[in-house]
Image (cartoon, helix red, strand yellow):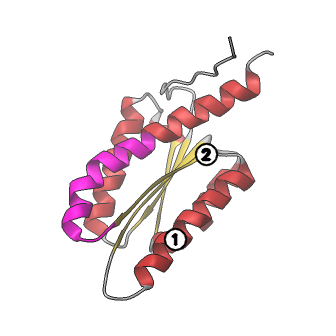
Amino acid sequence: MPHLFSADVDGREIAVGVVASRFNEPVCDALLAAAVGELQRLGVPDDDILVARVPGALEIPAVAASMADSGRVDAVVALGAVIRGETYHFEVVSDQSAAGLMQVQIESGIPVANGILTCDTDAQAEARMHVKGAEAARVAVEMANLLRAIEHEPR
C-alpha cells in the first residue's frame, strides 16, 4: 500500500498572511472578512493572521512574496476581484496576478491560496465573495499542514 500523506485544517499551529486588494472594495472587503472568519474558525490565533491591503490585484504577488520570504507565515491567502470590462486589461490582470502567485509559491515553498475572483460581472463577484474567501483560507491552512507533514513525517 503506498504511503498517503494526510493534512487537516487545524490552524492552531499555523500563521497565515492575507493580502487583499482594495480595488472593487466592497467585494474585497467581503472576501477578507470571510477569509479571516474562516481562519479564526479553523483555530488560527489572531496574532498569527497578518493582513496587508494593496491597491489592486497586480500588486498582490509582490506583497505575497514579501510575506512568504519573511519567515513569519506558513501560508498566504491572496484576495481580490477582477471584473471584466470593455478592454483587454481584464485578461492581463487576471493572467499576470495568477502567474505571479504561482511563482511566489514555487520559489518560496510557501503555499499561496489564490482567492482572486475573475468574473464577468459585479453580480458574479458578489455571489462568490463569501464562499471564495473562506475557501481560500481553508486551502491555505490545509496546504501548510500538508507541506509540514511531508517535510517532517518520518520515512
Point out the residue furthest to the left here.
Answer: 123
Q: For residue 111, which numbered disc appears in the image?
A: 2
Q: Is residue 6 above or below residue 51?
A: above
**Quadrant housing the N terminus:** top right
The amino acid at mark 1 is Asp
Q: For residue 54, which numbered disc appears in the image?
A: none
Q: Is residue 88 above or below residue 31?
A: below
Between residue 100 and residue 11, name the one nearer to us: 100
Instruction: Please state if 127 lies on the left or on the right of 15 as rendered.
Output: left
Which span is picked out in magenta? 119-137
Point out the residue furthest to the front here.
Answer: 1
Instruction: Please state if 23 lies on the left or on the right of 128 as rendered.
Output: right
Q: Is residue 66 above or below residue 97?
A: above
Residue located 40% across and 63% down the image: 80
Residue located 44% across and 73% down the image: 56
Quick check: can you spot residue 66?
A: no
Label 2 secondary element = loop
Point out the residue furthest to the top here.
Answer: 1
Question: Where is residue 113 shown, x and y percent of the image?
Answer: 51, 49
| Mark earlier in primary sequence (2, 1) | 1
Name the quadrant containing residue 6: top right
The amino acid at mark 2 is Pro
- 3D distance between C-alphas at marks 2 and 1: 18 Å
Label 1 secondary element = helix
For disc 1, the marked residue is 95
Question: Where is residue 129 shown, x and y percent of the image?
Answer: 28, 54
Is residue 11 covered in magenta?
no
Between residue 41 and residue 90, name the one nearer to us: 90
